Image: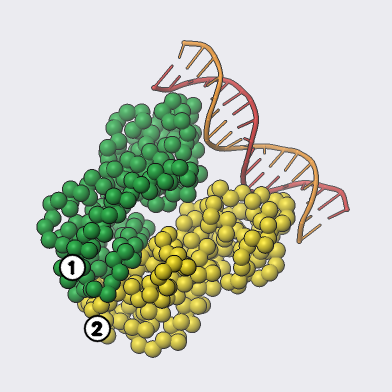
Chain colours: A green, B yellow, C orange, D red
Amino acid sequence: MASKVKKLANGMEDTPRGRLLAAAAHLFRTKGFERTTVRDLAQEVGIQSGSIFHHFKSKEEILRCVMEEVIHFNTGRMREGLDKSAGPRDKLLALIRSELNSINGETGEAMAVLIYEWRCLTPESQEHILELRSHYEQLWLDTLQEAQQAGLIAPQRDLFVLRRLMAGAISWSHYWYKTDGEIKLDQLAHQALFLALHES
Amino acid sequence: MASKVKKLANGMEDTPRGRLLAAAAHLFRTKGFERTTVRDLAQEVGIQSGSIFHHFKSKEEILRCVMEEVIHFNTGRMREGLDKSAGPRDKLLALIRSELNSINGETGEAMAVLIYEWRCLTPESQEHILELRSHYEQLWLDTLQEAQQAGLIAPQRDLFVLRRLMAGAISWSHYWYKTDGEIKLDQLAHQALFLALHES
DNA sequence: GTCTATACGTCGATAGAC
DNA sequence: GTCTATCGACGTATAGAC
């Protein structure tokens, strides 16, 4: 039922199309893309399965749109966080916080879909999404470089590798981190910052 | 065809059952569990689809067995590496090396299956696999604690969180790390060790 | 232990009325 | 823009011969 879909936020308007995307993020996350049928999707928003194909030309297109939306939304939010921060340490912390938030906050389901349903995209869609992500990754590398030049990160560390390691560390949190647990997201961000810093 | 399956190593004997498991690790990794059909699987080992069900009672059982085998094999290898190392720093490095090797070496496909096809297990199987992993995780926590007591890891760091972050950092490497690239696995292990150490 | 044949459900997507 | 009805393909698993 439509009421089960918690929030249509994240730039997803309250239109049939937006509701479908929100439901898709939820179902693709919990059941996986393959196991989710267009009939599941239709039921979740309260229409019939045939009606879906008026809004999207295929099931794969729905997946691609979920991924596009979440990248756009989070790239914007990350840029905001970066603009509000001064100094390399705070900028780095802002990036970490922003990424942790993407994964464990309101956009968490869509982010998990972005990570785990990658294979279900056609090669053309994969290429398109990769292109969207590249700006996002460049912001990370620039910030890390700034931090290393300021002496916050040891000179012998490979920043390209460091970014990959941190991306894994952060994204993995969706497996174990509980928003309502003991650890606050901000504490987690600081623990993750230690991964990069020279002197903890 | 059977010849396409590179190695039946990793404790998988050269029996019909072992060949099926090796083929399953490969196919589940590249196509995903859902997209892999029992017909694909049968073709890969050169039998008919119906014959599979003489060896396994369901497709899900094959998945569970792939996961069980890879956990057993890698827990053993990790213990070996640990036994050969002296001192907390080397022990930690041994764990990192061992885990990187599990993910990027011969057992890489099965490890990726373990991580990414989790949802496809029945709840009963999930519980069973979790139990198998718990010993493995305890070895990590013990080693981290030893390192912290020796002053290698800053006292303000939460070791439970650190292990989770490192698990993510390491497992993520299967997405981007290329065994035949510039970076050697041992270099990567050292870069990953920096994530934990107080003074890089 | 592998074969052939097939039961039987479910899938994505389409067609055409309203 | 949503409905109903349905097509044709493909999925897992089984039955029984060899």
- Tag 1: amino acid: Gln
Distance, label 1 to label 2, CA atoms, is 27 Å
Label 2 sits on what residue type? Gly
Is residue B33 placed above or below B177 in the rendered structure? above
Residue plotted at (54% across, 51% down): B31
Of helix, strand and loop, which one carries label 2? loop
Residue A89 x, y percent position in the rendering:
16, 63
Mark 2: few, some, or many residues within 10 Å (few <14, many ≥20)? some
Left-right relation of A10 to B99:
left
Residue drawn at (44%, 49%) of the image? A118
Residue at the spot 36% in from the left edge and 47% down from the top edge: A131
List x then y, in percent, for residue B4. 64, 60
Q: Which residue is mark 2?
A: B151
Q: Identify the subunit bearing mark 1.
A: A
Give the secondary structure at mark 1. Answer: helix
Name the subunit of mark 2: B
Residue B161 in view, yes or no: no
- In the picture, which quadrant includes the N terminus of chain A? top left
Residues at marks 1 and 2 touching, judged by CB atoms closer than 8 Å: no
- Is residue A85 or residue B56 the one in the foreground? A85
Q: Is residue A36 visible?
A: yes
Q: Quadrant of residue D10?
A: top right
Residue at which label 1 appears: A149
Residue A156 placement (x, y as % from top left): 27, 75
Whether B89 is drawn above or below A14: the answer is below
Q: Residue furthest left?
A: A86
As drawn, is B16 to the left or to the right of B170?
right
Identify whether A136 is placed above or below B108: above
